[in-house]
Image (cartoon, helix red, strand yellow):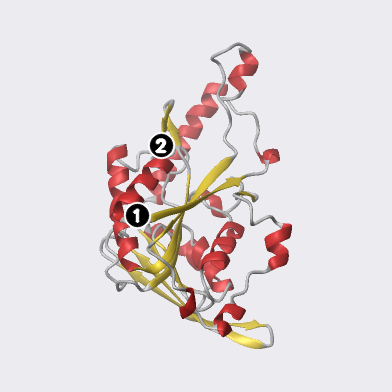
């Protein structure tokens, strides 16, 4: 089994490298609107953010094959006390574009990884009504479908190659609309670059909604989680990432030294080809964002002292 992975550094609002109806699955996590410790000040306002979602959503609809699925891992964001309804707005936008809103899955993070924060801790200091602010331990996976899928077009051989592992399906309770998966912790080396969703999350979505050898697209690739998991599951992948500064970590996660990577796989050899394309509209964002984040963290630290 050989797979091909194309990483394009450029704006996903123009996926000029992709033909209509050429993609079999989309798995992505858009930037969380100006999230204080991930994307502070990245967008001028919320309307600009929603315009990005709409433009990328239209491109996703164009390139996605009939009947296929687009998965968004996302959550509402609170900034300066105001909660922005990102999830409901994405659902509205995608339905207006023409997608069917198929499902929602709650990704619940382990409670043990959540400490009482300054938000929920207010009630401990002031145990009275109106002081309550809950800590969030979940994100949402919203799932859209373009048209109707033709099951008869998939050969029995391909079905068998792509069979869902029923033991994992049952033991890990994939059948529920709530998945309990450990998040990528802030101390993890990868997470210092951008907000990252766990490989296990991508693994479930890719296994449940695509067949071996098909193409998985991530228009907001980040550190490359979707491409990494697609490679391991014998799917091809295409990723768009506007921040050129993430190229080294994507290369590292894909285990790349050369353009073609040969790895032992079972009793044979697996060929993995990776191509990088750097467009003129790629940007350098991470250094600027990290500077703003570090300034916020320093101010927070100074307040404690």
**What residue does disc 2 label?**
85
Where is residue 123, by image quadrant?
A: top right
**What residue does disc 1 label?**
284
Q: In whole angstroms, how far apart are the C-alphas of marks 1 and 2?
A: 28 Å
The residue that appears at 48% across and 78% down in the rendered structure is 152
**Residue 136 image position (x, y, % from top left):** 57, 35
Q: Classify 10 Å Cα crowding around label 1: few (below 14), some (14-19), many (20 and above).
A: few
**Residue 5 image position (x, y, % from top left):** 45, 74
**Residue 153 image position (x, y, % from top left):** 46, 79
Element at label 1: loop
The residue that appears at 60% across and 28% down in the rendered structure is 117
**Residue 49 image position (x, y, % from top left):** 32, 44
Quarter placement of the C terminus: top right
Counting labels gives 2
Q: Relative to 47, is 267 on the left or the right?
A: right
Where is residue 147, by image quadrant?
A: bottom left
């Amino acid at each position: 089994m050989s797979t091909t992975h194309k990483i394009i550094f450029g704006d996903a609002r123009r996926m000029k490298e992709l033909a209509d109806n050429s993609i079999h699955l989309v798995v992505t996590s858009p930037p969380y609107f100006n999230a204080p410790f991930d994307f502070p000040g990245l967008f001028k306002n919320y309307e600009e953010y929603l315009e990005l979602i709409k433009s990328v959503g239209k491109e996703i609809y164009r390139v996605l094959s009939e009947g296929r699925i687009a998965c968004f891992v996302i959550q509402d964001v609170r900034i300066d006390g105001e909660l922005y309804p990102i999830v409901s707005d994405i659902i509205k936008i995608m339905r207006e574009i023409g997608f069917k809103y198929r499902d929602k899955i709650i990704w619940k993070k382990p409670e043990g990884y959540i400490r009482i924060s300054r938000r929920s801790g207010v009630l401990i200091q002031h145990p009275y009504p109106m002081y309550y602010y809950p800590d969030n331990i979940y994100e949402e996976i919203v799932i859209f479908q373009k048209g109707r899928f033709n099951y008869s077009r998939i050969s029995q051989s391909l079905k068998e190659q792509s069979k869902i592992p029923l033991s994992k399906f049952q033991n890990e309770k994939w059948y529920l609309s709530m998945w309990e998966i450990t998040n990528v912790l802030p101390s993890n080396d990868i997470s210092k670059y951008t907000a990252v969703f766990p490989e296990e999350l991508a693994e479930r979505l890719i296994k449940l909604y695509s067949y071996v050898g098909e193409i998985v697209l991530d228009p907001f690739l980040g550190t490359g989680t979707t491409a990494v998991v697609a490679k391991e599951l014998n799917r091809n992948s295409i990723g768009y990432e506007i921040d050129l500064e993430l190229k080294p970590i994507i290369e590292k996660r894909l285990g790349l030294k050369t353009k073609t990577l040969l790895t032992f796989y079972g009793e044979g050899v697996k060929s993995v080809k990776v191509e990088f394309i750097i467009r003129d509209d790629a940007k350098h964002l991470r250094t600027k964002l990290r500077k703003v984040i570090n300034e916020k963290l320093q101010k927070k630290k100074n307040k404690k002292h």
